[in-house]
Amino acid sequence: MINTSNGMISASSSSVNAQSPGLKTYFKTPEGRYKLQYEKTHPSGLLHYAHGKTATQVTLAHLKDKPAPSTPTASSSSFSASIGVRSAAARLLGAGNGNRALSFVGGNGSSKSVSGNSKAGSLGSLNSSNSINTTNFDGKGTYLIFNVGDAIFISDLNSQDKDPIKSIHFSNSNPVCHAFDQDAKDGHDLLIGLNSGDVYSVSLRQQLQDVGKKLVGAQHYNKDGSVNISRCASIAWLPGGDGAFVVAHADGNLYVYEKSKDGAGDSSFPVIKDPTQFSVAHARYSKSNPIARWHICQGSINNIAFSSDGAYLATVGRDGYLRVFDYTKEQLICGGKSYYGALLCCAWSMDGKYILTGGEDDLVQVWSMEDRKVVAWGEGHNSWVSGVAFDSYWTSPNSDGSGETVMYRFGSVGQDTQLLLWDLEMDEIVVPLRRYTGGSPTFSTGSQSSHWDTVSPVGTLQPAPSMRDVPKLSPMVTHRVHTEPLSGVIFTQDSVLTVCREGHIKIWTRPGVADNQAGNPENVLSTSLKEKTLPSSKVGGSSYRQ
């Protein structure tokens, strides 16, 4: 039970030792059963709910092999802590911070096992000869990074242990959004945005190596609100941007940073002349960071997402509008309004052709970049839609073999505690209504963008179309997966992850995966990010407030 007035959560709801009554441990799809394999959560005793309305988001992070360094990559003080400190950390988290690779079986970095099966015992019994292995810990594997209350938790996706292997606590504000760049060229690959507006970039590997509960080696941006005093709402790395990232704030502004520049560099921007219009201002000095401010809208930006090639940036906000920008040209391309209320989440298809949105109208909308229109809407949720994602690992059973995608699978989650799966078949989508002055409505089964351009020129924000003019989708699967409102969904090669606002994560394996794992001692979940590069490894639609 949750008391949303003060943000407190009861012990019963923070425990996921047993499956909640009334919730099934599987759901059926045409290709077979998805089964609940295990759950992840946070140690409830370590939480301090200063801001009860912060929704948990999850970022999936895959660390590659670490190149052999010629010198230690972290300060010696990080590794000179006494065994007593290590044991205390192990007792608090049940497994120690960042040392999991040394002790568990079947998880990240599982090639080394130090001692027995006891998590705390294996770390508590470390002696000076094997504790030095921490300096060689490469952190290779796949991790879940999620925020709850005043902390960031890191869990090993490949281990079935519920508890995280690392916690990072913030004293003055709560983390609300984060992003990971698996292709980062230097150590800083993790971004964390706070309720205060502060932003940090850090090395995930370095956090795992450290035994403490504070950020180490962090670069601090927008310190004490020097650039913007409103809360961070969403954060994202620019794909292939060589360290560029963007931070969206609750006041409708988005800032472009470069991690290679000092986070404390002078940045002052001119006053926004017309708050109702999109505008871009660049920093006056070459050393400034952030380097640009985009004024997107009045009110909060709730979520942002880059297309997989980084060419386009989509934003959704409190005003109910989806906006799509040409990132390089800094130009508004298209956008449109929800049927009702705010939009809370958005996601791109891998090919960059379609955008999903969800929000307070309880609907999922499918936008076509070619047509710059809503081409389908889905009805099935009973409350706000808080997370959407395309399943880029799913293959259509009726693929034509040409390499052209003829059907898309996507998922949505909402505050109704339900996961919905949808199939979007291109042959069944009718291009939305085109009206000629004085004429009757016409339809086309083909995409004719040259005609659409005359109706919807570049830079136009459209009102919501009539529902009867847009094809309706029905969910293929509707499944209640949690007892609490959901905040996000993410797809991996072998599973579907769902997360609720209070920080409980469930991993649902795809049909046949559990059987394959039973016959193979090497956990195949570690390949979840190797086969295909996702446009975004973040889950969680927004850090919105009710």
Image (tube, rainbow, N blue to C red):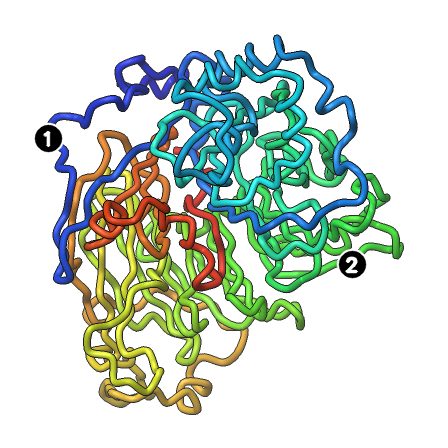
Q: Which of the 4 image quarters holds residue 160? A: top left
- Between marks 1 and 2 in the image, the one whose residue lies nearer the viewer: 1
> What residue appears at the point 70 percent right and 60 percent down from the top-left corner?
242
| Residue 5 on image: x %, y % | 38, 18
Residue occupied by mark 1 = 22
> What residue appears at the point 68 percent right and 32 percent down from the top-left corner?
135
| Residue 47 on image: x %, y % | 47, 16
> What residue appears at the point 47 percent right and 35 percent down from the top-left corner?
146
Q: Is residue 342 or residue 29 the one in the foreground?
A: 29
CA–CA distance between discs 1 and 2? Answer: 54 Å
> What residue appears at the point 51 percent right and 35 percent down from the top-left corner?
112
The quadrant in which the C terminus is found is top left
For the residue labelled by badge 2, is the local secondary structure a helix, a strand or a loop?
strand
Residue occupied by mark 2 = 282
Q: Which of the 4 image quarters holds residue 117? A: top left
Relative placement, left or right, of 181 versus 358 is: right
Relative placement, left or right, of 133 versus 430 is: right
Instruction: Please state which amino acid type lies under the numbered disc 2.
Output: His
